[in-house]
Amino acid sequence: MLIRRERPADVTAARDVHRAAFAGDGEPMEVRLVDALRESGDWVPELSWVAELDGSVVGHVVSTRGHVDDVPAVGLGPLGVQTAVQGTGVGSALVYASIGAADALGEPLIALLGAPEYYGRFGFVAATVHAIRPPEPAWGEHFQVRTLTEWRPSITGTFRYSAPFTTVV
């Protein structure tokens, strides 16, 4: 398996990964969200990763610009993995790549909405541990942050995702 930055030629394959990973009735919200994030000014190309296996894209993740009050940070997701390779480490490799890249870019933290039992293994904790409030209070412990090298305890407040997270439904 190869984890690498997404290239322009990967856009359709990345869309197909999310379509398969979040299959249901109609076009999955995650597909529409990734498309809208690409068009937003918050897309960070250095934080869009694919997992390639035998020459095919089997996973995709992106982190986009977010903020804790006025402090820039990043929001991770969507993260999608082809059904046939779920549970084989593809998702974990994409999360590790995202953490390393965000840290190398000097970001203070990564925020996400997800399962604590999954993301805890990567060092994510409930955001409230660091006095960071979720955009929706009902998210509770599922809204998590992973602090990075540039994190400072003075970074507190409410996290705000890129606009498509609230406009795409």
Image (spheres, rainbow, N blue to C red):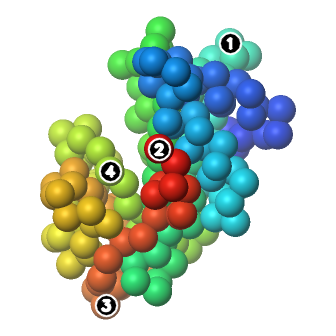
Of labels 3 and 4, earlier in sequence is 4
Q: Which residue is mark 1?
A: 54
From where the camera sits, is residue 108 visible?
A: no
Image mark count: 4
Mark 1 Cα shell of 10 Å, populated few (<14), some (14-19), many (≥20): few
Closest to the camera, between mark 1 and mark 3, is 3
Residue at image location 69% in from the left, 17% down from the top:
56
Of labels 4 and 2, earlier in sequence is 4
Mark 2 Cα shell of 10 Å, populated few (<14), some (14-19), many (≥20): few
Distance from label 1 to label 3 (Cα)?
A: 45 Å
Q: Secondary structure at mark 3?
A: loop
Of labels 1 and 3, earlier in sequence is 1
Of labels 2 and 3, earlier in sequence is 3
Q: Amino acid at mark 2?
A: Val
Closest to the camera, between mark 4 and mark 2, is 2
Q: Do the CB atoms of the residues marked 3 and 4 lie less than 8 Å apart?
A: no
Residue at image location 58% in from the left, 34% down from the top:
31
Of labels 2 and 1, earlier in sequence is 1
Distance from label 2 to label 3 (Cα)?
A: 33 Å
Mark 4 Cα shell of 10 Å, populated few (<14), some (14-19), many (≥20): many
Q: Is residue 93 left or right of residue 133?
A: right
Q: Which residue is mark 3?
A: 154
Q: Amino acid at mark 3?
A: Ser
Q: Position of residue 117 (x, y in %)?
A: 18, 39
- Of the numbered discs in the image, which one, if any, rests on residue 169? 2
For this orientation, the residue located farthest to the bottom is: 154
Q: Secondary structure at mark 4?
A: strand
Say if 134 sits above or below 132 in the image.
Answer: above
Q: Amino acid at mark 4?
A: Leu
Of labels 1 and 4, earlier in sequence is 1
Q: Secondary structure at mark 1?
A: loop
